[in-house]
Every structure is written in C-alpha cells, then in structure tokens.
Amino acid sequence: MGSEAAAPPSWEALRVAELALLERPIQEEFARYQAEVRRLLDLGLRRRRVLRDTYRSPRGWFRILVAVEGIDQELEALREALLRGSRGMTLMERFDAIRGLLLDVWM
C-alpha cells in the first residue's frame, strides 16, 4: 500500500474555499469549492480502492457509494442556495453536511 494513498487529506484548502465562498458567493468561488470537494473525494476513493484489495466488504462499498451520491446532492443544494441568494448559516450548514460525507469516505 502506497504511503500517499493512505495519508490523511489536508482539509485546510477546503476551509479556505469555504471562507472564500462565504465572502464572495459567486459562481467562480463555487467552482473552486466544488473542485476542492472533488479532490478530497478522489483521494478518499483512491485510498478505499487500495484498502479494498486487502479487505473486501460489500457493506463498505455500499457506504462509499451512498456518500458519493450524498455529496453530489449536497453540492447541488449548495449551488441552489447560492442562486437564491442565501448567506451565512444556510451555506455553513451545507458545508458541514459535505464535510461529514467526506469524512465518511475517509473513515
């Protein structure tokens, strides 16, 4: 197992993207935030693929697929909230939900 695949992610870039989106709720900042979520998701899924080789669990794969679908749904809900002009706590609730789902992939 490669050390890069097993290393925990850096969440700082996600935090920076969240703050930028809160300060400037525009499409460009949403795209940056979405790219960072996808980066963390890709890292987590690559790690899971490595672990799957040594531990095959249909239940574990189901949890990962549900988390990926949930992340897509939360990103869409965040985009819709931005289009409606939502701010503050509404956006932070979406950030929290997405972080939780990302953590599910990494656990």
Image (spheres, helix red, strand yellow):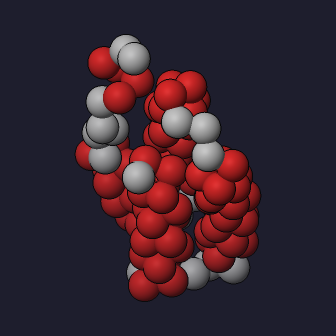
Image-quadrant location for residue 63: bottom right
Residue 34 visible in the shown view = no
Q: Is residue 66 left or right of residue 99?
A: right
On the image, the x and y values in percent for residue 86 come to 57, 81
Residue at the extreme bottom: 89
User: Is the N terminus in the top left, top right, bottom left or bottom right quadrant?
Assistant: top left
Q: Is residue 73 left or right of residue 33?
A: right
Picture residue at 35% right of the left edge, 29% below the top? 6
Front-lying residue, 53 or 70:
53
Picture residue at 50% right of the left edge, 71% below the top? 97
On the image, the x and y values in percent for residue 48 come to 52, 36
**Above or below 77: residue 62:** above
Picture residue at 52% right of the left edge, 36% below the top? 55
On the image, the x and y values in percent for residue 34 come to 58, 47
On the image, the x and y values in percent for residue 68 come to 66, 53
Residue 53 visible in the shown view = yes
Q: How many marks?
A: 0
